[in-house]
């Protein structure tokens, strides 16, 4: 997976989750503090890389060397190859459900472990460390992920309801991003093998993909900022009045 697409997925995961999470919390009758929102953005950003664990050359597959490399090959075999079994709605539901089960069974310990991995992957993909690919860079990334997970234990205090949604939602955001490239995704596997494709980004890793993604994020950021300043929900046109 080209690095630029990996970054696109990570940024999309964080940005769209930040926009959707407050409304989701309100609809579910849950509390979502500013600290929890920030932490959940790291989780969604890292989870937005999970579908590409079916590709041995993807960022996530190279995170822990042979360990994640072998895992990626196993996932690819089970999924039937790249952009197949891990790139459908059922995969989002299944992984989200497993995360929810782990939350019930393991509590804060399991959620902190998941947050650490997802935060590390997000920071690695976004290049949030000097000397990337060197031992010093790895130490910095581990330290950053440790700070995030430490904050998680302090801020959340056992209330991790959002983790299930951030993981499943992050995966869904990835799949929707891939759906906007020429390759498309088999969105409704295992019920249909037909690939759904809205190729507004062109080929994965191409210049059009980078331009469309950058332009879209810029417009989205301006829209949400203006709506927030005006005191209106960002998903409405109220701030234009």
Image (tube, grey):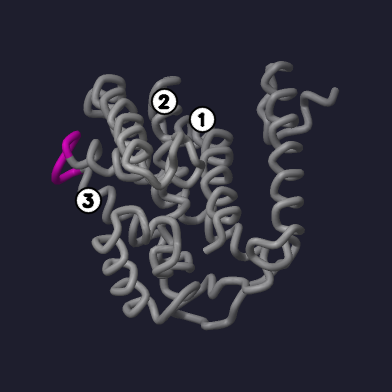
7 over 218 or under it: above or below: below
The stretch drawn in magenta includes residue 160: no
Sequence-wise, which precedes: disc 3 or disc 1? 1
Q: Which percent across, then down, holds residue 182?
A: 68, 72
**3D distance between C-alphas at marks 3 and 1:** 23 Å
Q: Secondary structure at mark 1?
A: helix
Q: Which residues are magenta?
A: 104-109
Q: Quadrant of the C terminus?
A: top right
Q: Residue at x 41, y 34 (%)?
A: 40
Q: Are marks 2 and 1 in contact (CB under 8 Å)?
A: yes
The front one of 122 and 191 is 122
Q: Are marks 2 and 3 in contact (CB under 8 Å)?
A: no
Residue 101 shows which numbered tag?
Answer: 3
Residue receiving disc 1: 22
Q: Earlier in the sequence, mark 2 or mark 1?
A: 1
Within 10 Å of disc 1 (Cα), the crowding (few <14, some 14-19, many 20+) is some
For the residue labelled by badge 3, is the local secondary structure a helix, a strand or a loop? helix
Q: Is residue 118 left or right of residue 171?
A: left
Q: Residue at x 78, y 32 (%)?
A: 237
Q: CA distance from mark 2 to mark 3?
A: 20 Å
Residue 114: x %, y % from top left: 27, 44
Q: Earlier in the sequence, mark 2 or mark 3?
A: 2
Near mark 3 (Cα within 10 A), the count class, few <14, some 14-19 or many ≥20, is few
User: For residue 25, what is the image quadrant?
Assistant: top left
Q: Which mark is residue 32?
A: 2
Which secondary structure is most common in the magenta stretch? Answer: helix
Question: Could you tell me which secondary element the residue under label 2 belongs to?
Answer: loop
């Amino acid at each position: 997976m080209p690095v630029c697409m990996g970054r696109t997925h990570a940024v999309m995961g964080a940005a769209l989750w930040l926009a959707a999470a407050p409304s989701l919390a309100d609809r579910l009758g849950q509390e979502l503090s500013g600290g929890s929102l920030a932490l959940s953005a790291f989780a969604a950003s890292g989870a937005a890389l999970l579908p590409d664990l079916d590709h041995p050359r993807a960022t996530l597959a190279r995170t822990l060397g042979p360990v994640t490399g072998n895992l990626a090959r196993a996932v690819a075999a089970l999924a039937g190859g790249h952009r197949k079994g891990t790139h459908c709605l059922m995969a989002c539901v299944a992984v989200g459900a497993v995360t929810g089960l782990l939350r019930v069974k393991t509590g804060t310990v399991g959620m902190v472990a998941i947050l650490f991995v997802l935060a590390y992957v997000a920071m690695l993909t976004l290049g949030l460390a000097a000397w990337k690919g060197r031992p010093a860079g790895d130490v910095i990334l581990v330290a950053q992920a440790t700070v995030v997970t430490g904050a998680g234990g302090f801020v959340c205090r056992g209330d991790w309801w959002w983790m299930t949604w951030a993981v499943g939602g992050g995966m869904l955001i990835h799949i929707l991003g891939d759906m906007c490239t020429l390759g498309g995704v088999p969105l409704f596997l295992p019920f249909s093998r037909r690939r759904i494709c809205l190729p507004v980004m062109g080929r994965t890793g191409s210049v059009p993909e980078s331009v469309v993604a950058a332009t879209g994020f810029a417009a989205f950021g301006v829209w949400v900022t203006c709506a927030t300043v005006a005191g209106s929900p960002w998903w409405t046109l109220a701030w234009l009045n």
